[in-house]
Amino acid sequence: MSPSPTEKLSQLSIESMPPTTRQQSRSQKSQSSTESEANSVDSRQVDNCLRFPSKLTYSLENLNPDIRQHVTDAVEGLPQITLQECAEREGHVIFQVSELANFRIRTGSRSSQWSTPSCSCGDESPSRTPCRHVLWLFDQITAQLLDNSGEVLTLNKYGYANVLENPYEMITECHLDILADDLHSRVLRTASDTEDALYNARRVQEVREILASLNRTPIDEYRPDIFDHPTGGRRVVKRNDLECTIFRMLCQNNEFFQYFLSSMKSDELVNNTFRKLQKRADAALAGLDAYAESPSSRQPSDNPKDVTWCATHLQAVVKKVHTAIMRARRPLELWERQAAGRTLLHILRQVVDRCRDLTPPTLENVDRNLYLKLIGDRDRNFAIGALNSLAPDAIHPFTAELDRIIFDMQKHGVPHSYAEKLRDVYERARRVRMGGSPIGSKRHRARQGGRGGKRTR
Ligand SMILES: [Zn+2]
């Protein structure tokens, strides 16, 4: 059997990996057949055997050289193949197989070798047409990087939307770790940290949310024995503990994780657009906090996670929240509206709590202080459009918090017009009577009270 995806992951060394996936099977066959046709004909004829995945060895002597080469190449490059199903038909049987192949797509700066995206599937017949992997990947990336409210994007001949201009620059400006989180992917820094990457904090947390949601248990109370100090190395099966076994599978196997995620209905925890956006905001804030704490480790050439960078991310998140509210395909349920409200209020709170001037003092004040940058300096309408696009019942559970936020803003100094707009949001939300309105139906309240409240904080 060829290696599992996680075994392949462990072999992954971004620097040293050859451009195709065949190294995995290379060790399975005799050394001589990897040499070039010209100088190894004799040794190949003597030693012209090939070991197949089942570990049976076949002699290729009876094949003509073309077919022999073809078979060798095919078995060398075998991806993971799964037999999906079979069927009996009139006079024949059918087997359906599918293959899981790994490809690497590189995209780089304008001056690099990869100024346009290049996929390893085309390494042997380099053509400039974008392959399906590039089309798929850049579609995923674009959906994360852009706020799209239905505009049609123009695809260029390299396989990505023109608006990305240079994808590498867009990705590095966003920072790969932030993008990777949104794509449920791990970032490998060196070949040796793959073990840690299996249990990276974001994945562990997502798995906890999935399993807690299935168990209807508050996240923090769900299996602390597994989640407080996640370990397990590469072992997957834990005897007498199915939940722990599934936890390890979900951490280690990307296909299984995606399958699980796509099979689950949206709820407060899982596949919740607004919660996901809140996590992106938190990742940007964590980046800024790390930047603030270690001025010495900053390198001027990097794209730093500074106030401007963080503010750009928060504005993008707020815009995406607004777009998700406005462009929802069906009316949002109460828990979804409240998730949107919670995310917006959370961001406001985090910004208000970051009213301090960071270094370096050479920057303008407004570029050193997140609160000033988004709210305090002048009325930029930050988050107002998104808040106003929500029905007041979405903000209702958070009126006390909104009141405190406005109070804290007034301590720091806030443009009068901006405070007025927030006060309007507050007043509308405060006046909602949840029990009487058709929106706050019993079903919704039961759901919120029974499952939502505590866990989603
Ligand atoms: Zn490809």
Image (cartoon, rainbow, N blue to C red):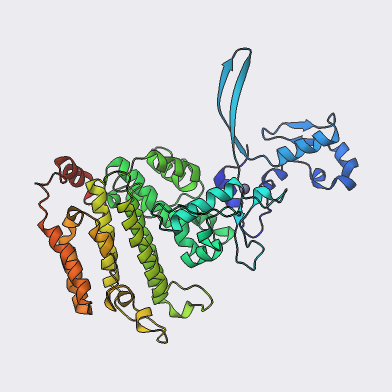
Quarter where residue 403 is shown: bottom left
State the image coordinates of residue 347 (x, y, percent, origin top left).
Answer: 29, 64
Left or right: 13 in relation to 37: left
Residue drawn at (44%, 58%) of the image: 146
Quarter where residue 424 is shown: bottom left
Q: Foreground: 370 or 353?
A: 370
Residue drawn at (20%, 46%) of the image: 448
Q: Could you tell me which quadrant the C terminus lies in? A: bottom left
Q: Is residue 397 visible?
A: no
Left or right: 17 in relation to 451: right
Left or right: 270 in relation to 428: right
Left or right: 18 in relation to 153: right
State the image coordinates of residue 245 (x, y, percent, origin top left).
Answer: 43, 41
Q: Could you tell me which quadrant the N terminus lies in? A: top right
Residue lying at the far top in this picture: please name it: 90
State the image coordinates of residue 439 (x, y, percent, origin top left).
Answer: 16, 45
As drawn, 343 above or below 100 = below
Q: How many marks?
A: 0
Residue drawn at (28%, 69%) of the image: 381
Q: Is residue 59 visible?
A: yes
Q: Foreground: 385 or 98?
A: 385
State the image coordinates of residue 108 (x, y, percent, origin top left).
Answer: 60, 63
Residue drawn at (58%, 45%) of the image: 132
